[in-house]
């Protein structure tokens, strides 16, 4: 295994256009605004953990081995599908290469106000679900059914988090998780 074939070049910190983070923002929704902060130590993304593409680098020789991004996935115009990065990260992991997080390389990501609205979160959830369906069915039906089972597990976790946020008097955080999960599921199902 070669060391450091792809880099997650560190932190991606959100800079909200409004100057105020949305009430629903939590560590569970941080990725919705393409943000990531995994602390001060360099470490490897293992298993089903993935970086965010807003601050990444891929060595050319690895990209030549795994191919380019899947253009059936990913956002374009009003389409809020996702998963082109997850797809390529999976292909890189399947080669046995490491994906690393480097906390010292940091960017600020400007988040427009419209990316924090209810409508955007609903459409983003549906887009994530649709892209997961396309991505997993592109591998196999078995992979798709595994993803459906994972969605069930994510539902259970979302309900537990919802209850926890309500007990902390932060219902907006819990409610937004359920709204997002509902829409991911809608996009994922046939």
Image (cartoon, helix red, strand yellow):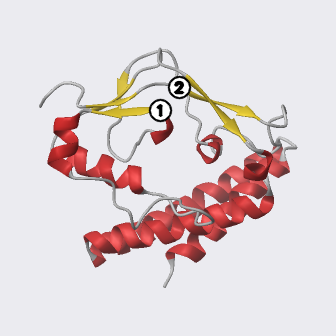
Q: Say above or below: 180 vs 137.
A: above
The extreme right residue here reads: 169
Is 132 displayed left or right of 181 in the figure? Answer: left
Q: Which residue was labeled with disc 2?
A: 11
Q: Where residue 165 appears, x then y in whole percent?
A: 77, 46
Q: Say above or below: 83 vs 140.
A: above
Is 70 in front, or is 3?
Answer: 70
Q: Which residue was labeled with disc 1?
A: 55
Instruction: Compute the Cα span from label 2 to label 1.
Output: 8 Å
Q: Say above or below: 40 vs 141.
A: above
Q: Where residue 17 appears, x then y in whole percent?
A: 79, 36
Is 34 displayed left or right of 170 in the figure? Answer: left
- Disc 2 to disc 1: CB gap under 8 Å: yes
Residue drawn at point x = 70 percent, y = 59 percent: 121
Residue drawn at point x = 63 percent, y = 61 percent: 124
Residue 7 seen from this side: yes
Residue 169, which numbered label?
none
User: Tag 1's secondary structure?
Assistant: helix
Q: Where residue 148 appears, x then y in whole percent?
A: 44, 71
Q: Where residue 15 appears, x then y in whole percent?
A: 71, 31
Residue drawn at point x = 63 percent, y = 65 percent: 78
- Give the mark nearer the N terminus: 2 vs 1: 2
Mark 2 or 1, closer to the camera: 1
Is 166 in front, or is 4?
Answer: 4
Is 137 displayed left or right of 2 in the figure? Answer: right
Label 1 crowd bin: few (<14), some (14–19), many (20+), radius 10 Å: many
């Amino acid at each position: 295994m070669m060391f450091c074939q792809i880099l997650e070049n560190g932190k991606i910190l959100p800079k909200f256009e409004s100057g105020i983070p949305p009430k629903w923002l939590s560590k569970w929704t941080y990725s919705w605004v393409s943000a990531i902060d995994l602390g001060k130590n360099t470490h490897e993304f293992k298993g089903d953990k993935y970086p965010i593409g807003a601050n990444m680098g891929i060595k050319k020789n690895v990209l030549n081995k795994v191919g380019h991004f899947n253009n059936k996935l990913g956002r374009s115009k009003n389409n809020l599908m996702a998963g082109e990065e997850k797809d390529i990260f999976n292909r890189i992991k399947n080669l046995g290469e490491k994906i690393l997080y480097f906390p010292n390389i940091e960017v600020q990501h400007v988040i427009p106000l419209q990316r924090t609205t209810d409508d955007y979160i609903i459409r983003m959830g549906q887009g994530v679900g649709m892209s997961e369906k396309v991505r997993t069915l592109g591998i196999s039906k078995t992979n798709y059914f595994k993803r459906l089972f994972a969605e069930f597990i994510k539902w259970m976790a979302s309900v537990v988090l919802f209850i926890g946020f309500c007990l902390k008097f932060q219902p907006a955080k819990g409610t937004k998780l359920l709204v997002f999960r509902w829409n991911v599921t809608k996009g994922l199902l046939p």
